[in-house]
Amino acid sequence: MNFKEKIKKIIEYYEGNKDLTLLPVLNFIQKEEGYISREKIKEISEILEIKEKRIIETISFYHFLNTEKKAPILYLCTNISCFLNGADEILKYLTENKDKLNFDFKECECIGLCDYAPAGLFDFKPLKKLTVKKIEELNEEIRKTFNKE
Ligand code: FES
């Protein structure tokens, strides 16, 4: 299924409501390509008949959407459930070892994984019951994937 066919499917799912369709379309592109290019913004603008300026504003509002390709980011939830279950310890580890990390990280609000606290998202994948050991393993996995020294 090519890009335009997928977008058409999303529009159909939202029964033609192009305003409701914008965010799912942006999420789809972000997941598929790792960012939302100027070309894609122009294309979406034409397909959904939404001004490019509004699309850019929407992208800049959401942490998970980017207009530039970036290394995957770990979003660590630091809301109450995660905080009470050890997110503070993980955040401390991340902050103190920032120079050794092969990825960026950011704190975020609740991501709906409270039952699996402390939780996070990495490249849109949920990370459940996080520990410092899991973070170290993730860091090693990224190092191997990107063949960093
Ligand atoms: S409080 Fe962390 S996922 Fe809900």
Image (tube, rainbow, N blue to C red):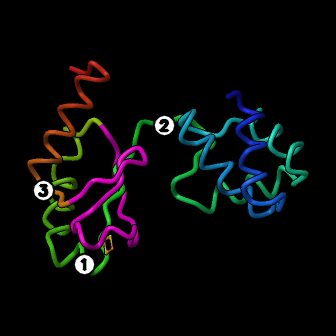
Quadrant that contains the N terminus: top right
- Mark 2 Cα shell of 10 Å, populated few (<14), some (14-19), many (≥20): few
> Which residue occupies the extreme left position in the image?
133
Identify the residue position indicated by label 2 in the image.
70
Residue 71 is inside the magenta segment? no
Can you give x and y, in whole percent of width and height, for residue 105 in the image? 34, 51
Residue at 73% over, 45% down? 9
Q: Residue 6: x and y, percent?
A: 70, 38
Which residue is disc 1 drawn over?
A: 81
Disc 3 is placed on an element classified as loop
Q: CA distance from mark 2 to mark 1?
A: 29 Å
Upstream in sequence: badge 2 or badge 1 = 2
Q: CA distance from mark 2 to mark 3?
A: 24 Å
Where in the image, quadrant-wise, is ligand 1 located?
Answer: bottom left
Tell me if the residue at label 1 has its CB under 8 Å from ligand 1.
yes
User: Measuring 18% from the left and 69% from the top, which residue is drawn there?
Assistant: 88
Q: Position of residue 138 (x, y in %)?
A: 21, 40
Q: Which residue is mark 3?
A: 131
Where is residue 118, by image quadrant? bottom left
Boundaries of the magenta span: 103-128
Q: Are marks 2 and 1 in contact (CB under 8 Å)?
A: no
126 falls in the magenta region? yes
Please say if the residues under marks 1 and 3 sit with CB atoms less than 8 Å apart.
Answer: no
Which of the image's four quarters has the C terminus?
top left
